[in-house]
Image (cartoon, grey):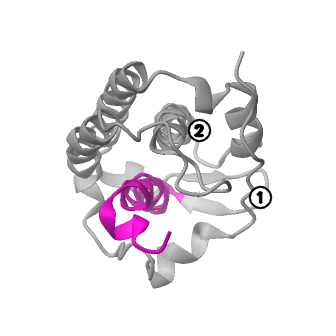
């Protein structure tokens, strides 16, 4: 059994700001057509598959920065979670979401030990299913609401943008553009 790598400081940034200002780090623009969320999500699959075949897929660029496989595990789980939450929002306008501790999940699921090839397949499956769920949103459903456990409120449209930023930002994290700062 592999010992856990160095602890990563818990994420405490409020990323909902990207919904207004975009992301200066990765260049995400929240003004995109949310109806293309599924298309853009599917477009990330080849990048993750390629990145997870690289020899350094399990190597952290620094002790407190996730390896590509750890990031891929995270976005795999984000796809599943957001697809479930999207379903809740579509079924019940004003749905409330239970808290999800991404850092605790990473430790409990031992992201650092997961097989990159397996994670690449799992990510492709989860991303494809989540893309289809966003593709199915129509008309007034984009205005359905949901509330996160910390009180952050979303419409399906802002939820789509928040979700897509998470995935695309982590693609940026594991590619040359994001690694330039390491």
SS state under label 2: loop
Inspect the magenta stretch and tell me whether residue 158 lies in it: yes
Q: Which mark is residue 92?
A: 2
Q: Which mark is residue 103?
A: none
Quadrant location of the N terminus?
top right
Q: Position of residue 31 (x, y in %)?
A: 32, 76
| Residue in the picture at 69% in, 69% down | 13
Q: Position of residue 30 (x, y in %)?
A: 38, 73
Q: Is residue 164 positioned above or below 178 on the image?
A: above
Residue at image mark 1: 9
Q: Position of residue 114 (x, y in %)?
A: 54, 23
Give the class, few, some or many, for how many residues have Cα within 10 Å of label 2's Cα (few <14, many ≥20): few
Q: Nearer the viewer, residue 24 or 114?
A: 114
| Residue in the picture at 22% in, 54% down | 36
**Left or right: where 36 falls relative to 9:** left
Tell me which secondary structure the magenta stretch mostly adopts. helix
Q: Is residue 102 positioned above or below 176 on the image?
A: above
**Left or right: where 132 falls relative to 28:** left
In this picture, which residue range is highlighted in magenta? 155-182
Q: Nearer the viewer, mark 2 or mark 1?
A: 1
| Residue in the picture at 44% in, 82% down | 24
């Amino acid at each position: 059994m592999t010992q856990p790598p160095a602890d990563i400081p818990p994420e405490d940034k409020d990323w909902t700001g990207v919904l207004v200002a975009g992301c200066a780090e990765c260049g995400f623009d929240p003004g995109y057509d949310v109806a293309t969320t599924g298309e853009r999500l599917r477009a990330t699959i080849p990048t993750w598959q390629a990145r997870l075949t690289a020899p350094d897929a399990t190597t952290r660029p620094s002790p407190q920065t996730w390896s590509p496989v750890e990031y891929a595990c995270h976005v795999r789980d984000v796809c599943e979670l957001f697809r479930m939450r999207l379903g809740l929002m579509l079924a019940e306008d004003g749905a409330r979401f239970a808290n999800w501790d991404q850092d605790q999940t990473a430790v409990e699921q031992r992201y650092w030990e997961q097989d990159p090839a397996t994670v690449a397949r799992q990510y492709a499956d989860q991303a494809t299913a989540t893309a289809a769920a966003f593709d199915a949103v129509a008309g007034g459903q984009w205005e359905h609401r949901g509330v996160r456990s910390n009180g952050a409120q979303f419409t399906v449209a802002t939820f789509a943008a928040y979700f897509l930023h998470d995935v695309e930002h982590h693609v940026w994290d594991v590619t040359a553009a994001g690694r330039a700062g390491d």
